[in-house]
Image: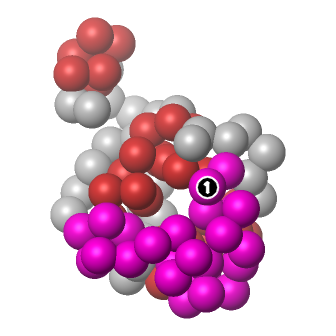
Amino acid sequence: MSELARTPNQIGTIIQRARKKRGWTQAQLAERAGLRQETISLIENGGKDAKLTSLLSILAALDLEFKIDARSRSEHRDIEALF
């Protein structure tokens, strides 16, 4: 699974899709990540106040990783079409 995310909303959508693909509730993901369900909800809804450590814990629980790459030069509307 490789997806592009440039906004908190896009990150939240990717996390939500990965969670639902596994058939987990927010509470189940929170337990696996060592966080509160409210934190999962905040991140899935694009909350801008999410901590990086929380995000990394969620990704680890979902067996995903955070990868940094050079930004592509495609147009904004092309990127939005991916989501």
Between 42 and 56, the one lying in front of the other is: 42
Would residue 58 appear left or right of 62 to someone viewing this image?
A: right
Specify whether residue 29 is painted magenta. yes
Between 41 and 68, the one lying in front of the other is: 41
Amino acid type of the residue that numbered disc 1 sits on in the rendered structure:
Ser
**To which residue does mark 1 refer?**
41
- In the image, what residue occupies the spot 29% across and 76% down? 23
The percent position of residue 37, horizontal first and vertical second, equals 66, 69
| Residue 16 visible somewhere in the drawing | yes
- In the image, what residue occupies the spot 43% across and 59% down? 15
Query: Eyeballing the image, is 34 above or below 19?
Result: below
At numbered mark 1, what does the secondary structure look like: helix, strand or loop? Answer: helix
What is the count of numbered marks? 1
Magenta region: which residues? 19-42
**For residue 27, which quarter of the picture?**
bottom right
The percent position of residue 13, horizontal first and vertical second, equals 41, 46
- In the image, what residue occupies the spot 61% across and 62% down? 40
